[in-house]
Amino acid sequence: MDNYIGWLSNKVTISRFPTIEDIQAGFYDGYQWRVNVSDIFRPEVDAVFKQRGLSSFWFPMGEAFNVSLDSLYGALRVMWEAGKHDQSLLLHCHAGRNRSVMVADSYYFLRTQEHRQPDQAGLKYAQHSPNRLLLNIYDGQLPGIYKMEEFLDCCLESFHDSFAESDRPLDWIKHNMHMRGSGFADSIAPNETVSK
């Protein structure tokens, strides 16, 4: 099993939205990263996680309307960093059944260039769960399959050739201005620079 798939199976936990009581009881101790992809932000939950030394990120994704590719990019960027350092990550949405699984399925595609199969061998989160990336594509919450695969390929390319400063490794917003296919980067001559 490839290293990143082993990391995805053994170091990533997909969960429902954590409660303060569960955090205080130590259910999430041992994680270094937390990615919230629900459309809910609870500052009191973030404060408790911060007290326990966990890095929290919020990339809101709606469930009844189009999923933000900016948010998906951000969540994947954090996963990339956590995986690179073999650190444990808590990934959650509201119920832990759709958006968070969709992000994990996107990461799986990004690393393997294949779509996860139901009950994929070696992936705990995949047990009895259809591929949520594909379901959200077919449901119209994400672009069509060709465009979505192209987007994920661009994400992978940007993670390898990161344009983030060394002191800001999670500066994911810049992808809007520089990623191939964004429309903006394509309109700039090769020797031109972008100024803010």
Image (spheres, helix red, strand yellow):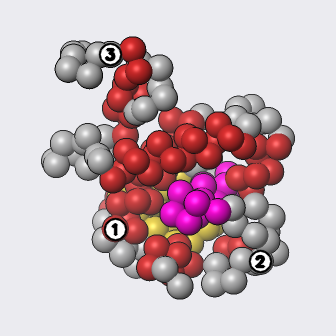
Mark 3 burial class by Cα count in 10 Å: few <14, some 14-19, many 20+: few
Mark 2 burial class by Cα count in 10 Å: few <14, some 14-19, many 20+: some
Q: What residue type is labelled 1?
A: Lys
| In this rendering, the label closer to the viewer, 1 or 3 | 3
Q: How far apart are marks 3 and 2 (CA)?
A: 45 Å
Q: Indicate which disc, 3 or 2, sits on the residue closer to the N terminus.
A: 2
Q: What residue type is labelled 3?
A: Ile
Mark 1 burial class by Cα count in 10 Å: few <14, some 14-19, many 20+: few
Residue of label 1: 84
Residue at the spot 20% in from the left edge and 20% down from the top edge: 191
Compared to 139, does 135 lie above or below? below
Q: Are marks 1 and 3 in contact (CB under 8 Å)?
A: no
Q: Indicate which disc, 1 or 3, sits on the residue closer to the N terminus.
A: 1
- In front: 145, or 9? 145
The overriding secondary structure of the stretch rendered in magenta is: helix
Residue 72 belongs to the span the image colors magenta:
no
Q: As drawn, is 113 to the left or to the right of 132?
A: left
- The residues colored magenta run 98-114
Q: What element carries label 2?
A: loop
Q: Is mark 3 on a helix, strand or loop?
A: loop
Q: Indicate which disc, 1 or 2, sits on the residue closer to the N terminus.
A: 1
Residue of label 2: 119
**Residue 141 drawn at (x, y percent):** 75, 37
Residue at the spot 56% in from the left edge and 78% down from the top edge: 9
Residue of label 3: 188
Residue at the spot 60% in from the left edge and 34% down from the top edge: 68
